[in-house]
Structures are given as structure tokens and as C-alpha cells.
Amino acid sequence: MLKKLLIANRGEIVLRVARSCRELGIATVGVYSEADANAAHVREVDEAYLLGAAAPSESYLNQDKILEVAKKSGADAIHPGYGFLSENSGFARRVQEAGLIWVGPPADAIDLMGDKILSRKTAKKLGVPMIPGTEDALDDPDELAAIAEKLGYPVLLKASGGGGGKGIRLVHSADRLIPELNLARSEATKAFGNPAVFMEKAIINGRHIELQIMATPSGRVLHFGERECSLQRRHQKLLEEAPSSISNPGLRERLVKAGLALSSGIGYRNAGTIEFLVDSDENVYFLEMNTRLQVEHAVSEMISGVDLVRMQLQVASGIEPEITQDDIQFRGHALEYRVYAEDPFAGFTPSTGTIEHLSLPSGPFVRLDSALFEGDSVSLHYDPMLAKLVVWGADRQEAIQRLKRAAEDFLVLGPKTSLPLVPFLAESEDFKTGRFHTKWLVPFVDSLENPGLDKRENAAIAAALTAHQSSRKSQSPSPASSGTRPWTLSGRPGFPSRI
């Protein structure tokens, strides 16, 4: 087993990985930007080192600095979390060339699945069902128009190097094809440095369902059931659940068959997620493979009882897990709601500011993956996700009611958040009965009226104003008041040992 792990990320995923490390007796090393000097993840790890300025290019994307920290701290492995460098095959190779363990899949697998055109070709060769579309990048406008006519509108233009919903354009008619192609190429170039775009037949009102897998050192591929991620805005997930609300033995069997064929066929190792689009007739189509731990891995853990991060660390260390597929039994239903610093009643516009008051949810079968604290500052430098509220219930309806109750207990004053939307979802008949799809959420939210502040929020605001004479510095956790275990002081804010 590895001895000392550098977690090359920020926020709640650092806390999540660090907690599994503590249970395994693995020392942890963190990194932070100047903007995150007082962040919770800096206090959670055993050592923390400054990388640079707030801009990701000068901090969390700075490969040289991260590898320098690994060497200085004596780390023998790097976990990239998700986002930032997690699917960067070049960084994975550099980690291994430096003699370190990479907690993730082989770099070649990241390359293969990171290019959407190449991944489509690979999946098709392995017999995985595909959405009708092109197998190569599109250059000739006349050829593009002919293919679109053959597929039938609407069609989707998608960036080959894409991810996170960027570089995707829905085209409803021939007159919009070339303008949307130019927009897709421009966005793809800015986001990924790769203008290549391919085309698929658009599946209207489809469901976004994915399969969580873990490939062991011996080549066994275990699966942890499917997750549904259809509640999205701007191609970004808001709520995930396991199992899917339309789950049945036949659908799960087809998802598993396709996912295992792909994973085994490319020699995959460690954690990964194969994403599918399921149409109204329950036809299953491959979308992409995420070669990392997913944000929504928590719901798979809740229904399977398996710590996926712990298993990641074991697999990366070359340890074959004793667990078999028959050992993995699914119980109940889990929901995960992403708490974003966004106003859902104003088009999900970003919100910033200082967290003036914070009240966290608890209770039976409630899990909160978060790095929030009072006095924390929410900026535009990084992803707007503040926390993940995860609940489990004996069935889906119980889980929905538990999510509603926990969200009502979860209060954040300062920046606006996505939390006020939860009660509306919980009371929606379409959501409760599973009659939704990837395009359902935004029109549903647009149909709602802004609820404004409730009595509890007003009371909390009054309390926060009463306590305002306390300085923000005293509100922020410090070594003397944090209540955490003793720190290794090297590299902490206020101490000299920095990179």
C-alpha cells in the first residue's frame, strides 16, 4: 500500500480522499492557491503547500509545481480528484516517469477515451451500441449538410476533445448548420485547444444513465450499478440518483454488458464511468467514458456499501481487492444534489460573496460532502459547486422526502445557492414518478416563481447581522480554533516552508 498521497485538487474532493487515507493510515499532502490559503482542504491534510496565484494555470494546473511539491514532501503517489488534471494523460505519464504512483487509469486509456471521435470508433469496434453519426471530424460543409439530411434533424455537433458540456450545439434546421458548426469549433478551440467536431443524431427527451466500474490489477472489471444523471442545465448535472428511476433487469443487463465490454477491451484499470443515452424505447447508446472518479460516485457508494476511493488506492498500489461481483449487493435508493453557488431562479447565474452564516444538515442516512465554513469566500476562479448533499432511503420516495428535509435544514447565507430548488423538485409529479429527461429541468425551473426568503432565512440574517461586530478574520477557522487534529506545520499559511 502506498504510504503518502498528494491530492492534486481543491475543495470537497480533497476532504473525501483524505478521509479514506486516514482510515488506511496513509499520510496526505495538499496543495492550494493564494485564493485558497484559508480553505478547508488546506486544514484537512497533514501537509499543505502553496502553488501560486488564484488562476488555475498558475496553481492547480501547474504540473511542474505539483511534481515539485510531491518530491519535496516525499509523497509516493498522486490522486488527481476530478476536474483540473484528472484526465490529462500527459500529467499521468509525468507522474509515473517521476517514479510516483498514479491513482487512476493508464495514460493510454485516458488518451483513447479522451478523444470523442477515437472513443466512438473504439466502442463501435468492441460492439458497444452507438448513436448514429459520423466517425471522423467534419471539414467539408457540403458533406456535413448531406450527412445531416441523411440522419434527419435535429442533430448534435460535439467537440472531439470535449467535456463538461462545452463544444456542444443542437441544430434543428439546415439554415443553422454552418453557423452552429462555427460556434462549436470556436468553443472547442478555446476550451480544449482542438477544433475537431463530429455529428450525431439528436436523441430527443433521452435519459443520461451511466455505469460505475472498477478495473482491478488482474484485469477483472467490477460494476457498482447504474446512476441516472438526467437533471441537467447547460449539459451540467444537478441531481444524480442510483439506481435509475427507470431501472429494470433488462436495461441494467444491457448497460453492464456494454460497459464491461468497453472497459475490458481497452485494458482499463482503476475507477471509471461509462456514460450512455437511453431513448424512450430503452435503446442504449454509448456517449463517452470518464477516466476518473466522478463527482456523483457517492450515490453508488450509498447503495453498494463500498468505499470507491479506498478501492482506488488499493488498486493503484497493485493490491487485488478480495471483493467479487456477487459480493456487491444493491440496497435502497440514493440521491445526490449538487449545491451550486448559482441562482436557479435567475437562469442559474453565478453568485459570489462571503458565507456569513452556515447551518448544515444531518440526521439518519444523510451525507454531506463539503468544504464549506462560515467566513469562506466564494469566487469566480473555480467551479461553482459548493457541496454535495447525499441521502439514502429504503426506496426512491423515501429518499426524495429525506432530500427535501435535509435541504430545508441546509442554510447558506451570503451567495445564492441552488438549494431553494429542492422542495419544488420534491413536489413535482414528473420528478416523483420518474417522467423526466435531459431537457426537462430548465423549462421546469423557468415555470416556477422565485420563492424569495423564508422565515428561517430571515431569522438567520438577523442573527448574522447581530454578530457582525466579529471580524471576518475571527470567523474564519485558524490553527487555534479549528478543532482539527494537530497539524504538520510545514507549508501551512503563516509558516515559511512553501514551494
Image: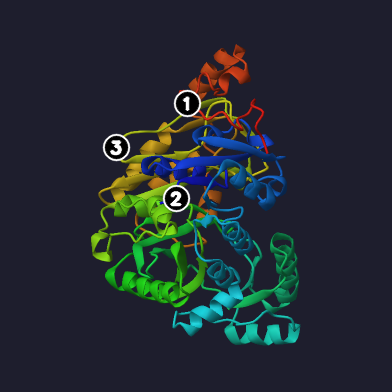
Task: Say which residue label 1 marks.
Answer: 486
The reply to whether residue 430 is visible in this rendering is no
Foreground: disc 1 or disc 2: 2
Q: Of residues 319 and 349, which is closer to you in this image? A: 319
For label 2, the residue is 2
Q: Residue at x 25, y 59 (%)?
A: 329
Question: Residue drawn at (45%, 43%), measured in percent from left and top?
Answer: 16
Mark 1 residue crowding within 10 angstroms, few (<14) / some (14–19) / many (20+): few
User: In 3D space, how far apart are the residues under numbered discs 3 and 2 (Cα atoms)?
Assistant: 34 Å
Type of amino acid at the residue the image marks with label 3: Pro
Residue 235 percent across, percent down from the top left: 57, 59
Label 3, residues with CA under 10 Å away: few <14, some 14-19, many ≥20: few
Disc sitting over residue 364 in the figure: 3
User: Which element type, helix, strand or loop, lies under badge 1?
Assistant: loop
Sequence-wise, the earlier of marks 3 and 2 is 2
Q: Is residue 129 left or right of residue 323?
A: right
Q: Nearer the viewer, residue 55 or 412?
A: 55
Three-letter amino acid code at the position of disc 2? Leu
Quarter the C terminus occupies: top right
The quarter of the displayed image where residue 465 is located? top right
Closest to the observer: 483 or 428?
Answer: 483
* Image mark for residue 282: none
Q: Quadrant of residue 352?
A: top right
Residue 260: image location, x then y, percent: 39, 73
Q: Which secondary structure, mark 3?
A: loop
Name above or below for residue 215 compared with residue 16: below
Residue that appears at 40% across and 33% down: 361
Q: Nearer the viewer, mark 3 or mark 2?
A: 2
Mark 2 is surrounded, within 10 Å at the Cα level, by few (under 14), some (14 to 19) or many (20 or more) other residues, namely: some
Query: Image check: 118 left or right of 213?
Result: right
